[in-house]
Amino acid sequence: MIPSQSALLTDLYQLTMLQGYLAEGMEETAVFEFFVRKLPDRRGFLIAAGLEQALDYLETLHFNDDEIGWLARTKRFDDRLIDYLRRLRFTGDVDAVPEGTAVFSDEPLIRIVAPLPVAQLVETRLINLLHYQTVVASKAARMVLAGPGKLLIDFGLRRAHGAEAGLLAARAAYIAGFAGSATVEAERVFGVPAYGTVAHSFIQAHASERESFVNFARIQPANTVLLIDTYDTLAAARMVVELAPILAREGIPIRAVRLDSGDLAALARDVRRIFDEAGLRDIRIFASGGLDEDAVAAFTGAGVPIDGYGIGTSLTTSSDAPCLDCAYKLQEYAGIARRKRSTGKATWPGRKQVFRRHGPDGRMAGDVLTLADDPVAGEALLAPAMRAGRRVGPTETLETIRARAAAQLARLPEPLRRLESRPAYPVEVSARLRALAAEVDRRTG
Amino acid sequence: MIPSQSALLTDLYQLTMLQGYLAEGMEETAVFEFFVRKLPDRRGFLIAAGLEQALDYLETLHFNDDEIGWLARTKRFDDRLIDYLRRLRFTGDVDAVPEGTAVFSDEPLIRIVAPLPVAQLVETRLINLLHYQTVVASKAARMVLAGPGKLLIDFGLRRAHGAEAGLLAARAAYIAGFAGSATVEAERVFGVPAYGTVAHSFIQAHASERESFVNFARIQPANTVLLIDTYDTLAAARMVVELAPILAREGIPIRAVRLDSGDLAALARDVRRIFDEAGLRDIRIFASGGLDEDAVAAFTGAGVPIDGYGIGTSLTTSSDAPCLDCAYKLQEYAGIARRKRSTGKATWPGRKQVFRRHGPDGRMAGDVLTLADDPVAGEALLAPAMRAGRRVGPTETLETIRARAAAQLARLPEPLRRLESRPAYPVEVSARLRALAAEVDRRTG
């Protein structure tokens, strides 16, 4: 139906350029790096994510017979290109920042070292894979910081931009600290724990709300979460109080209720009071419906008795910042450093590394962007990920990545842990890197 | 790698509810409708899109052995559900608004009539498919209206939310009037014409900009579009003037240049003047780089000499409004109308139809939302799309859909064709529909 693995998931100009490179014999080693130029207004940090899918893409990259046949039939390309694509595999080196790491502007998330045509071709899908998961992990991390100790669940497959987005969002949110996702396939594919309650249609399809509650409890005796806002939330809460002892006699505890509309703060307080007065202190309150990190922070700040949140659209579309100003740029070709000087889009040339310093409290204190062969004090962020087209070391588990993200969030400077994070984290550009940029400018200009 | 066809692309609660419906013998006919509750602030209309993929999903829906095996191993579900899912096919009826049609708030884009468990299960992926393409087609239509006569190309695969989003965005933008997309796979899969120029890396990889221009022209003699902003745009434009007669002697016309950074309006005017003074009036100017409909409208209004636009991120993420407040709701079960009364999310019950009136000038004059069996004057928007699980009539071609969208844009009331469209288009709710809602409320409440 909708292919996700095709090597044709690329821009036409990549193929046009490849034909040019081959015609001119330009197959020497190129170095490209992917980085974010400038963080969105409301992002003080990013959480790198998507590397696993990027490596998988590189490791399995090839044009199959259907794709080659179709390309040939378009008559856009010469035989040399078609033949080259038929044999193309990714045999390059990759260095990358491990998933779950906090990163900032201008810092390379990945560096590709490969023959120019190959390194060029993979641009589109690499950006596509790294950009989106980094967008979602960064958004999800804000929600995690806004609701310490709260159970956060991804509810956003339906309004994600397609199936792949929904699946990758579940993964990225889990990395950032969500407890799981409503998306069943995300559990099967990635091992992200699946969570779920019940929809309004279930309540509506029954002759009465009461009957729907009893029936739902009986089919989900170990996980009874009742949706109480279909008609009148407080009336439904009182019905829960009435049903609780009846269901308890059947051995069914009501674990939680879900609120999905109205003034969630006021309703949560009223529902909590109704339950507490009836001695039902163990029933948790779960909320959903158009929520984002600002809502979670406001509820947390006001001590609203909500125990968990289902967050959908704002998470999977990162609705306030659905994209990053990011780029995958040529930094070196045939041993010579390169840069682009376009207004507002100038890049730092050469193979780069990021060194991170930490303060005495263990918090991140500042990064230095410099050349890979110019080490400075601190922790190097980019590590070898592939050599000659093969992965270095075993695939990281999602739990490892998730633990790293949690540790990174804990080590962020305090101002960056707030939703309105100022001042910006310091990323210094080394003297050697500045000197190289000036040298490249003299040469090209 | 990342599956796009799995029947498990659904929310866990759908499966939980199905188990409940089966346990209670609730398999009678349900009617669900998908609609948008409220248009985003800067959308005066939407262009319906995604129906083809939705019908394809319904027509091919099934759980394969791997999916069934995995579900059984989770031990979350009883044998009755597993067996039901193994046999499940979509055998229902679908009525829908044809793709390319302008739609407004509360108007059903699709109506599903099927046994309750099936109609429930398909909710997540149906919304996922219809929502995103409608988001992008609606965004693209604004760009088309903002740049009459301009060549508009989708450049947005790299920052789309995954591969599926990139492909579907290319399709939706083409429906709305874009000329094509840079995404190669979108041409293979959907027949959306592929377009492309060249990237900065091509320029940078060469020893000089001049050499890169000459080489690119020789490999793309029939389609020479030169990217002139890598180092100094006006210097590069003068280089184009110098190269034009040389390339002309080789039979190569320079068709266009692309600007991708800086003050595009000022640069376009300067470049146009440089070309015109050299008698190169036929070289077109194409612009890209962070553009949206507001930029296109501003350039159009100021008479900036740009002939076409490559639009990426703002299109494929619909960055100012990446999501719609939409829902798929139960409207009838077992012959009885249903509605949800949740605060701010109340729905209109029953099987509905939209009738559209047109003024003497042929423009849309107002819609009436009413019951399907309560026809009023005007054009009915929903038409049969599937009966008993089979499509009604042949699949519409993309060209048919695109022509419909163009006709619809031409028939929009003039205020809706502006980027800040006020007043809202009138959608009236019929007296019979209001009476039914009141009746349902008395029954449930």
Image: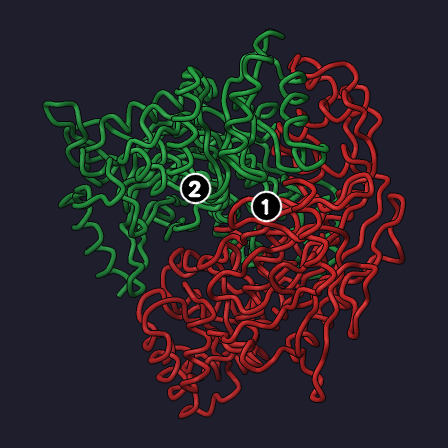
Chain colours: A red, B green
> How far from the left and from the top, in percent, is residue A221?
59, 71
Q: Is residue B155 left or right of residue B204?
A: left
- Check disc 2 and report its element: helix, strand or loop: loop
Quarter occupied by the N terminus of chain A: top right
Which of these two is toward me, B445 or B173? B173
- The image quadrant that residue B139 belongs to is top left
Q: What element does badge 1 sit on?
A: loop
Of badges 2 and 1, the one in the foreground is 1
Q: Vertically, is B160 above or below A355? A: above
In this picture, residue B121 sits left or right of residue B70: left
Q: Which residue position holds label 2? A: B291
Image location of residue A398, percent across then percent down: 74, 63
Q: Residue at x 61, y 23 (%)?
A: B188
Query: Pointer 1: what residue?
Result: A341
Report crowding for label 1: few under 14, some 14 to 19, many 20 or more residues within 10 A (C-alpha). many
Q: Position of residue A344 (x, y in %)?
A: 52, 50
**Whether residue B10 is situated above or below residue B171 in the rendered picture:** below
> Can see residue B387?
no
Nearer-the-camera pick, B58 or A406: A406
Camera sees residue A16: yes
Q: Quadrant of the C terminus of chain A?
A: top right
Chain of the residue under the numbered disc 2 shown in the image: B
Mark 1 chain: A
Residue sitting at x 40%, y 20% = B277
Name the amino acid type tagged 2. Answer: Leu
